[in-house]
Image (cartoon, grey):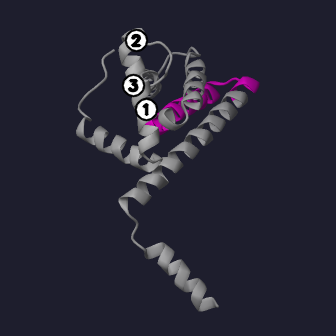
């Protein structure tokens, strides 16, 4: 019996996984990370709200950035397979992001605020609500494309494609 358990563990630990399996795992992990970052963000806000301090404020802002980055890592999968949840978590992140600083920002905190602004702008591009800079045709087309993607691909395949696209086009920055 012990031999069989060891055999299963060794097989599980050392068995090579396919790219599809790794992408599926990353897609699922990214969705869990969004959830955990959301909870952490709320907890750090509650702690700051209960006992305001510069350190608590900085921690909360850092957690808002972590939430935005977590959403960004799962954005195509979440926007494709859970559009309503995607819209709601982005709206929550927006509401958390508008808090003013409580003191002048140092370089590190300025970098956090700049990164948060960039992440939120990129996330806004996948929301199904109206985009001021986009024509109705582009919004409808992007939405329809995600519907087709959801029917044709698994979350792992979407995750892999998103990662490949980002690597190939990492030099491109979205216009502001």
User: Can you identify the residue that label 1 sits on?
Assistant: 146
On residue 142, the disc is: 3
* Image spot of residue 169 (x, y percent): 25, 35
- Tell me which segment is drawn in magenta: 48-77
Q: Quarter of the image holding residue 49?
A: top right
Whether 89 is among the magenta residues is no
Q: Are marks 3 and 1 in contact (CB under 8 Å)?
A: yes
Q: Residue at x 41, y 43 (%)?
A: 152
Q: Residue furthest top?
A: 132
Asked whether residue 19 appears in the rendered view, the answer is yes
* Image spot of residue 52 (x, y percent): 70, 23
Gap between marks 2 and 3 measured at Cα: 10 Å
User: Which quarter of the rendered picture does the N terminus lie within?
Assistant: bottom right
Q: Secondary structure at mark 3?
A: helix
Q: Secondary structure at mark 1?
A: helix
Using the image as rendered, state which of residue 164 and residue 20 is in the foreground.
20
User: Which quarter of the rendered picture does the C terminus lie within?
Assistant: top left
On residue 136, the disc is: 2
Crowding around mark 3 (Cα neighbors within 10 Å: few <14, some 14 to 19, many 20+) is: some
Q: Are marks 1 and 2 in contact (CB under 8 Å)?
A: no
**In this image, 173 relative to 29: left or right?**
left
Gap between marks 1 and 2 measured at Cα: 16 Å
Gap between marks 3 and 1 measured at Cα: 6 Å
Using the image as rendered, state which of residue 133 and residue 110 is in the foreground.
133
Asked whether residue 111 appears in the rendered view, the answer is no
Question: Mark 2 or mark 1, which is nearer the start of the sequence?
Answer: 2
Using the image as rendered, state which of residue 61 and residue 144 is in the foreground.
144
Q: Secondary structure at mark 2?
A: helix
* Image spot of residue 149 (x, y percent): 41, 38
Question: Mark 3 or mark 2, which is nearer the start of the sequence?
Answer: 2
Q: Residue at x 43, y 32 (%)?
A: 146
């Amino acid at each position: 019996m012990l031999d069989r358990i060891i055999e299963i563990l060794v097989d599980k630990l050392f068995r090579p996984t396919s790219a599809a399996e790794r992408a599926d795992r990353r897609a699922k992990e990214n969705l869990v990370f969004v959830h955990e970052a959301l909870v952490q963000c709320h907890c750090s806000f509650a702690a700051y709200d209960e006992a305001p301090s510069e350190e608590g404020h900085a921690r909360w802002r850092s957690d808002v950035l972590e939430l935005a980055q977590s959403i960004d890592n799962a954005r195509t999968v979440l926007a494709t397979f859970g559009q309503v949840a995607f819209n709601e978590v982005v709206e929550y992140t927006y509401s958390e992001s508008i808090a003013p600083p409580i003191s002048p920002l140092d370089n590190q905190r300025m970098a956090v605020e700049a990164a948060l602004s960039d992440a939120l702008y990129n996330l806004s591009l996948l929301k199904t609500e109206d985009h001021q800079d986009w024509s109705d045709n582009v919004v409808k087309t992007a939405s329809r494309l995600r519907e087709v993607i959801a029917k044709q691909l698994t979350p792992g395949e979407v995750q892999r494609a998103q990662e490949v696209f980002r690597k190939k086009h990492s030099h491109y920055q979205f216009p502001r």
